[in-house]
Image (cartoon, helix red, strand yellow):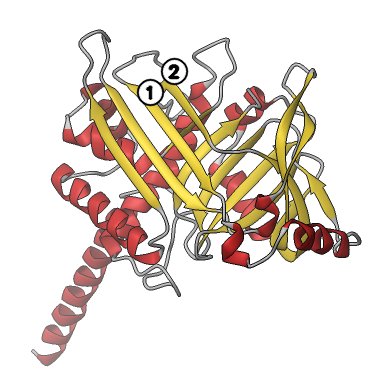
C-alpha cells in the first residue's frame, strides 16, 4: 500500500512539474524578442515581469516595422517611430488591420492588460531619466483621409562640442554631397565596426540611455534597413567596446511624416494597408554654455587637446536607435538620410 502511495505521489509531482514547465514556456512565448531585457531590476531600469514581456513585443516589432517601411515605396525619406506609442494607439482604437497580423506572432490574451503595461513601462522610463520628454497624440483632420498619430521625443545631448558647429559635406544615398551642420563631440563612447557597418553608442540624457548610430559601409540605406534584424542588433550590442573617442555627427533633430506599413511576419507577402499617418519629431537638446562654464576659446582648446584621439565622421545615411543601456529596451528607431 505504501509503495502504491509513493508511486502515485511521484506521478502527481511529475504532472505538476510538467504543467509548471508548460505554463512557463507559454509565458515566455508572449514575445519573441531576443534583445529586450531578461532580468528584473537592472541597475537603473526596474521593470515588472509583465513590463518586460511588453518590451519584448515592442523590441521585436520595431525591427519588423523597420524592414517594411521602404519595401512599400520607391522613394527614400527620413523617418523615426516609437513602437510603444504605436502599440498603445493600435490597441486603444482596435485597429483590426494590425491586430490580425499581431495575433499571428504574439500570444496576447488580454489587450487591456497590454495597454496598461505600456503605460506603466513609459512611466518607468520617465522615472529612470526625467530629462526625456515624450508624447504620443492622435489628431483627426477632416481634410485628411487618415488619422495622424503624432510622436515627439526630446532628450539632452550633454557634450561641450554641441556648442560649436561646422558646415561639412554629407554624402547622400545617390552619392551626391550637400553641406550640413556638424558637431564634434568627445567622450567615452561604444564602438563596433566590421566590413558591414560602423557603429557608435553615445550616452544621452542622464546616461541611462544611449543613441546607437549604425552607418552601413557598402550597402545603400534602403537595402540596409530592409535587411537589418534584431539578431544583428544584438551582435552589435555584444561587440561594443567603450573607449575615448571623438565623433563628428550631423544635426540630428528632425521631423518626418509617413504611413507605417503592416509588418511582414513569417515570410508573408507585405501588405500595403494604410490605417494612419505617423508624424514623428526627434529633438536632441543642446547644452547651454553656462552649463559648462566655458567660452568659445575653451571649447576650441579642449578639442585640439584631443587631437590624438581616434576620430570617426558620420557623413553618410545611417540607422539610429535610442536604447536603454541596461536593458536594450528601444525607445525610438529611425533612419537619417541627410534630406
Q: Is residue 141 above or below residue 282?
A: above
Near-viewer residue (33 or 327)? 327
- Residue 92 x %, y %: 17, 35
Of the numbered discs in the image, which one, if any, rests on residue 270?
A: 2
Q: Quadrant of residue 263?
A: top left
- Residue 69 x %, y %: 49, 23
Near-viewer residue (325 or 147)? 147
- Residue 47 x %, y %: 33, 65
Left or right for 17, reference 1: right
Near-viewer residue (115 or 304)? 304
> Would you say the residues marked 1 and 2 are in contact, meaning their CB atoms lie under 8 Å apart?
yes
- Residue 79 x %, y %: 51, 28
Q: Secondary structure at mark 2?
A: loop
Left or right for 131, reference 293: left
Residue shown at the point (69%, 61%) measured from the top left? 189
**Marks 1 and 2: which is nearer the front?**
1
Near-viewer residue (159 or 32)? 159
Q: Quadrant of residue 4?
A: bottom left
According to the image, label 1 marks what residue?
A: 262
Distance (Cα) linking label 1 and label 2: 7 Å
Picture quarter with the C terminus: top right
Residue shown at the point (77%, 34%) measured from the top left? 167
Q: Is residue 63 above or below residue 31?
A: above
Left or right for 189, reference 12: right
Q: Quadrant of residue 228?
A: top right
Left or right for 251, reference 100: right
Picture quarter with the N terminus: bottom left
Q: Secondary structure at mark 1?
A: loop
Q: Residues within 10 Å of mark 2 (few under 14, many from 20)?
A: some
Amino acid at each position: 500500500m505504501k509503495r502504491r502511495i509513493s508511486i502515485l505521489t511521484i506521478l502527481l509531482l511529475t504532472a505538476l512539474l510538467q504543467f509548471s514547465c508548460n505554463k512557463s514556456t507559454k509565458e515566455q512565448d508572449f514575445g519573441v524578442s531576443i534583445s529586450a531585457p531578461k532580468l528584473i531590476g537592472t541597475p537603473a531600469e526596474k521593470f515588472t515581469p509583465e513590463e518586460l514581456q511588453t518590451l519584448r513585443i515592442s523590441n521585436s516589432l520595431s525591427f519588423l516595422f523597420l524592414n517594411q517601411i521602404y519595401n512599400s515605396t520607391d522613394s527614400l525619406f527620413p523617418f523615426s517611430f516609437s513602437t510603444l506609442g504605436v502599440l498603445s494607439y493600435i490597441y486603444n482604437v482596435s485597429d483590426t488591420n494590425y491586430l490580425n497580423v499581431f495575433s499571428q506572432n504574439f500570444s496576447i490574451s488580454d489587450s487591456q492588460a497590454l495597454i496598461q503595461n505600456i503605460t506603466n513601462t513609459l512611466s518607468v522610463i520617465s522615472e529612470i531619466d526625467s530629462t526625456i520628454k515624450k508624447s504620443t497624440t492622435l489628431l483627426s483632420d477632416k481634410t485628411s483621409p487618415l488619422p495622424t498619430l503624432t510622436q515627439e521625443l526630446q532628450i539632452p545631448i550633454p557634450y561641450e562640442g554641441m556648442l560649436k558647429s561646422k558646415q561639412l559635406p554629407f554624402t547622400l544615398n545617390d552619392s551626391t554631397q550637400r553641406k550640413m551642420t556638424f558637431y564634434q563631440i568627445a567622450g567615452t563612447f561604444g564602438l563596433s565596426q566590421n566590413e558591414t557597418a560602423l557603429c557608435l553608442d553615445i550616452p544621452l540624457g542622464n546616461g541611462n540611455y544611449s543613441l546607437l548610430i549604425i552607418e552601413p559601409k557598402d550597402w545603400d540605406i534602403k537595402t540596409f534597413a530592409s535587411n537589418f534584424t534584431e539578431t544583428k542588433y544584438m551582435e552589435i550590442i555584444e561587440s561594443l567596446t567603450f573607449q575615448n573617442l571623438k565623433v563628428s555627427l550631423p544635426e540630428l533633430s528632425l521631423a518626418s511624416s509617413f504611413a507605417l506599413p503592416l509588418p511582414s511576419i513569417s515570410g508573408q507577402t507585405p501588405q500595403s494597408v494604410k490605417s494612419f499617418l505617423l508624424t514623428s519629431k526627434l529633438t536632441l537638446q543642446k547644452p547651454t554654455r553656462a552649463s559648462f562654464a566655458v567660452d568659445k576659446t575653451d571649447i576650441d582648446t579642449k578639442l585640439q587637446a584631443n587631437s590624438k584621439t581616434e576620430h570617426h565622421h558620420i557623413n553618410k545615411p545611417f540607422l539610429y536607435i535610442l536604447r536603454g543601456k541596461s536593458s536594450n529596451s528601444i525607445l525610438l528607431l529611425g533612419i537619417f538620410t541627410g534630406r
